[in-house]
Image (cartoon, coloured by chain):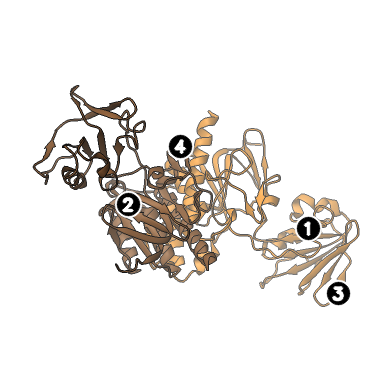
Chain colours: A orange, B brown
């Protein structure tokens, strides 16, 4: 196995805060990996007109999104499409796990945006006791048992296909429209989930029409993951990551910027925080030596 | 005397933080006055190339300064040249005093930039006991006594001329080059001040060449005023104004943004903080009702 490259900075997210962090760390000659979605900031893309980003009056969100990506490209950086599922703080670095890859970095800047996720009744209660966000991680625990996969995005199909080789039965509940590429053993249900039921663990998934699926596992695949699920032990302030004025979290070497640190959910705030987070990460790296 | 207009927001300073605050408060339909120097941000103006303001790679400082001023003008706002000397928090509003005017506002955003002022030995020690930053305020205390005026800028000439009608002797020590417009009673000294001497109060000003001027008052006129001198009772953290993540200072209704809140002294950070300060001021105003 080849030795893992340990980056100086891993930026998780590629909206304005993440890209601002990336260019600021790049100016300081750090080695950076940007892990984001292919589209980066759907919210920015949809903004018809932005009037409060100083120096660029009346710019459209899409113009600014393009300008930001081009700006990053000028530093030789590009966004690597990767949905980070777990970040593990080790002694001298962090491991960032996606479904298929492991990245390593000495510092991490979270710029994951706002998570406005309506959790399903029972989801929090049964997390780790039948509810999971990662088939690759937890799938083997459900060998020979019936499971359901609820997914906001196409990636869930691969999770379902993986589970088809393990579970006795796989229900796939897509919350998006597309043509599905699924193993014939997977049953697609066009339905809305209503609640997860059980006593000490998951015993069933109730759908909006009242149907109850007898499953012992429910896998939920969403675009966004709540930051404290992403990083075990991360301090939150309500739904926002708790940071100080240097954008430091409670975990040394881990910084956060932009909407994920709380209101106001605004472009200039995100860009400014990305810059501060990057410079704090650079200072942290310099002190490691 | 006509009734004073009470603005919603007074922005003190017109660098990137101040102008970002102004446009963000303007979008929320607040009545704003921007009090600044004619040039706003000499530091921005001198920056040959800025590469870390997301979306505008390679912009020159002067281009960005022009773009920012134009941006503000699009909201019908302009910078009023005014050097604020003291800010007095009253029960329901603030009074902002310049040498010749009084402005009033329900909230104040300080965006005064970095103050890198080398204070003169003895200056802090004798402040209020012979040392003053405002002839209009303290001049009458020196009736019939000899005083010196040390000035970084032409404005000091008016201070000296005012003192000429009060003091027994006025030495004027300009730390700039220009043709001076001074009352014939004022003595110009081309010299560098070295220290202020005295026991319980000012007894003399020593110059770099060793000369001692026998004065009981020393007036110091500088472009920048330390923020805690500007606002009595303002909490500082070293030389920076202490603010929380909402850019609030310890004084209700008073916010601060940009370089004056501490490092990093960077454009994006200033613009982001200006935005947050403005939105916090707007929220404060909404709660007043």
Alpha carbon separation for disc pair 1 and 4: 44 Å
For the residues marked 3 and 1, what is the alpha-carbon distance in whole angstroms? 21 Å
Which is in the foreground here, disc 3 or disc 4? 4
The residue under the point 31% across, 49% down is B44
- Does residue B278 appear in this view? yes
Q: Chain of mark 1?
A: A
Decide: marks 3, 4 in contact (CB < 8 A)?
no
Around disc 3, counting alpha carbons within 10 Å, would you say few (fewer than 14), some (14 to 19), or many (20 or more)? few
The kind of secondary structure element at disc 3 is loop
Q: Are marks 2 and 4 on the same chain?
A: yes
Question: Between marks 2 and 3, how big is the CA–CA gap?
Answer: 70 Å
Q: What element does badge 4 sit on?
A: loop
Q: Chain of mark 2?
A: B
Q: Residue furthest bottom?
A: A209
Question: Which residue is the site of mark 1?
Answer: A124
Spatial distance from mark 1 to mark 2, Cα to Cα?
54 Å
């Amino acid at each position: 196995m080849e030795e893992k490259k340990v980056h100086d900075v891993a930026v998780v997210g590629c909206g304005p805060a993440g890209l601002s962090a990336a260019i600021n760390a790049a100016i300081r000659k750090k080695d950076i990996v940007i892990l984001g979605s292919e589209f980066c900031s759907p919210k920015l893309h949809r903004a018809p007109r932005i009037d409060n980003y100083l120096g660029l009056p009346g710019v459209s969100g899409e113009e600014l999104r393009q300008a930001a990506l081009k700006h990053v490209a000028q530093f030789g950086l590009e966004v690597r499409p990767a949905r980070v599922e777990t970040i593990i703080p080790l002694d001298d670095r962090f491991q960032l796990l996606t479904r298929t890859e492991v990245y390593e970095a000495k510092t991490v800047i979270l710029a994951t945006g706002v998570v406005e996720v309506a959790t399903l009744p029972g989801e929090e209660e049964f997390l780790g006791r039948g509810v999971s966000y990662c088939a690759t991680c937890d799938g083997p625990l459900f060998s020979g048992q019936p499971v359901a996969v609820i997914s906001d995005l196409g990636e869930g199909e691969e999770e379902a296909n993986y589970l088809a080789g393990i579970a006795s039965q796989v229900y796939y509940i897509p919350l998006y429209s597309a043509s599905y590429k699924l193993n014939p053993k997977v049953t697609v249900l066009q339905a809305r989930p209503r609640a997860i039921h059980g006593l000490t663990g998951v015993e069933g998934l109730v759908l909006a029409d009242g149907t109850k699926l007898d499953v012992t596992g429910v896998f939920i695949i969403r675009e966004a993951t709540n930051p404290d699920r992403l990083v075990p032990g991360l301090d939150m302030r309500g739904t926002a990551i708790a940071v100080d004025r240097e954008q430091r979290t409670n975990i040394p070497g881990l910084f956060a910027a932009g909407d994920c640190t709380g209101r106001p959910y605004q472009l200039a705030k995100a860009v400014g925080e990305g810059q501060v987070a990057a410079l704090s990460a650079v200072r942290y790296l310099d002190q490691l030596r």
